[in-house]
Image (cartoon, grey):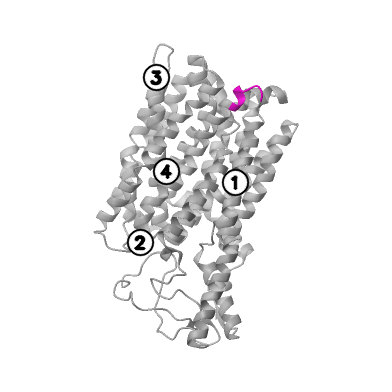
Amino acid sequence: MWSYVQYRRIGRDLRTQHQNRGTDIDKRPARDKHIDGEDTPNSAANKSERLRPARSKQDDVIRVEFMGDEDPLDPRNWSLLARSKNIAILSLLIFVQAWAGGAESMANSVASKEFGVSKTAENLSTAMYLFGIGTGALFCGPISETVGRNPTYLISTFCYMFFVLGCALTPTFGGQVVCRYLVGLFCSATLSINGASVRDQFRPVKRAFVFPIIAWANVAAPVIAPIAGGWIVSNPSLGWRWTEWVTLIISAFGFLVALLFLPETYPPILLDWKAKHLRRLTGDSRYRSEHSESPKFLCKMRETLPLPVTFLAREPVVAVLGAYLILLYVLLFTFQSGFDYIFKETYGLSPGITGSCFGAVAAGATAFTLGAPGLYSWARYHTEFVQGASITPEFRLWPGIVAAPLLPICLFWLGWTDYRTASIWSALGACFLFGVVLIALYVSCYEYIVDSYGDHSAIALSSVTMARYLVAGGMVMVARPMYEGLGVHWTMSLLGCVAAVLAPAPLVFWKIGHRLRRNSPYAKA
C-alpha cells in the first residue's frame, strides 16, 4: 500500500519537474555515484554536483541514476523521522516472526502428550522451524533484489500467517511438523534480508546506532516468547494452542502495519520506477535503469547458489565469525529445552516461572541495546564528525573483542552454580550476562561482515544465516538427550570450552583483518 503511494509520488514529482523544465528533465553534468551507500573519495568536493541520466556510447540508452549525494529519492537522504519509522516497522516484523521460534517451547510437555510422542520428538517442531529458515535464506536475497524488499517482506509474511494458523489447528504431529517447517521457510525473508534494508537507508556511521535495534528484535523475541508461553500453558482455561493464536494475532498486527506504512527501500528498484515514469512522461523509450538490465531471478540463482559454500570454505572471516553466530544460536535455541533442566528440575518451578527465567536473557540483550547511542557517538568521534564518512571494518569488532571472553565465563558460571543449594539469582545473573554477550557478538559479527564485503555482504550473510539455522536446528534435536546424558554441569562446560576456543577470533581479525580483505576476491580492500 505505502509502496504504491511512494510509486505515485515519484511520478508526481517527475511530472512537476517535466512541466517546469520541459522535456529535458535535468541538463546538469553527470558524475559517478555509488548506489551501494559508500561515498566516493571526492564526494566532498563534488557535493554540489548533480546527475543527469547518462547516455551510453551508442546513444541508445539513457541511464537513470541518482542526482548527486543529496538526491531525495535516495533512501539514505530521507528524513530521520521517516527512516526511524521504517526501522520501527521492520523491527516489528522481525520480532513477531522470530517470536514464532520460541512460542511453542514451553508447550513441549503438553503438546507431546496430546500427540502421543516423546518430548525429544516434539522438539522437531522447533527444529523444523529453524530448518525452514536455513533453506529459505539462500533464495531471499535474489528475490528481494529482483522484485524489491517491500513485496518480499509482505508476501512472505502473508504466507507465513497461514501456516501459523495451520499450526494452531492441526490435529496431528505430522501436520504440526510440516506447518512449522513452512512457517520457518516464509519467515526466512524477514529474518535474513533485514540487514540489507538497514544498509539501503543508512550510511556506515549511523549503522552503529541502527544495527543493535535490529539485532535486539532478532534475538530478544525467541526469549520473550517463552515468558508468555509459560503462563499460557499454565492457564488451564487456555491450553497450549493459544501460544500459536497469540503468535498469529501479533503477526497479523505487524503485517497490517507493514502493509500500510512500509516503503520500498532498495535503490535499484526506486531508480527503475523513476525510469518508467520518465519513459511515460517523455515518450522516450531509451530511459533505462541498471536494474532493468540486470540478470533475471533464475540467472541470479545460478550465480548465487554455489557461493555460500565458497564463502564458508574460502573466506576465513565468514567461516570463523559464522561459527561464532552458530554457537550463539545453538545456545539460544537449546536453552528452550535446557531451562527445563537448569531451572524447572533444579528449583522445582512451574512452567510459568520457568518461562519467566528467559526474561534475564532478554534484560541483558535490552541493556546492551540501550547503549546503542554510545556506539553511535563513538563511531562519530572515530570519524572526527565528518558527515558521510566511512569507517574501517575493524572498528566494528570492539564490542565483540570485549564480549568474547565473557561468553565462556557466563556458561561455566551457569553450569557450575546450578545446584538447589545455590541461589536462583546466581543462574539468572549468568543468563543476564549471556544476553549482553549474545547481542554484542551478534552486532559485531554482522556489522564487520557487512562492512568487509560491501556488495557481496548479502551473499556472505546468507551463507552465515543458512549455516547457523541449519546447525541450530540439528542441535535442538540433541539438546534433551545431551542435558539428560551429560547433565547441566558438563553440557555447559562443553559449550563453554567451544566458546573459549572461539574467544580470540574478534581480536585476531582486528589485527589481521585488513590483510585478509586484501587477499580476498570478494572483500573490499
Of labels 4 and 2, the one closer to you: 4
Give above or below for 140 relative to 47. above
Gap in Å between the C-alphas at discs 1 and 3? 42 Å
Question: SS of the residue at dot 2?
Answer: loop
Residue corresponding to mark 2 = 525
Gap in Å between the C-alphas at discs 1 and 4? 27 Å
Give above or below for 479 relative to 73. above
Gap in Å between the C-alphas at discs 1 and 2? 43 Å
Give above or below for 389 relative to 124. below
Total tally of numbered discs in the picture: 4
Residue corresponding to mark 1 = 253
Residue corresponding to mark 3 = 416
**Numbered label attached to residue 237:** none
Choose the circle earlier in sequence order: 4 or 2: 4
Q: Residue 305's spot in the image, x, y percent? A: 58, 55
Q: Residue 386's spot in the image, x, y percent? A: 27, 63
Gap in Å between the C-alphas at discs 4 and 2? 23 Å
Name the residue located 55 percent from the left edge and 48 percent from the top edge: 93
Choose the circle earlier in sequence order: 1 or 3: 1
Q: Image quarter for residue 385?
A: bottom left
Crowd rating for badge 3 (residues with CA inside 10 Å; few <14, some 14–19, many 20+): some
Give the amino acid at mark 4: Tyr
Name the residue located 55 percent from the left edge and 59 percent from the top edge: 149
**Numbered label attached to residue 442:** 4
The residue range painted magenta reads: 232-237
Question: SS of the residue at dot 1?
Answer: helix
Name the residue located 47 percent from the left edge and 38 percent from the top edge: 220
Choose the circle earlier in sequence order: 3 or 2: 3
Gap in Å between the C-alphas at discs 3 and 4? 26 Å
Of labels 3 and 4, the one closer to you: 4
Gap in Å between the C-alphas at discs 3 and 2? 45 Å
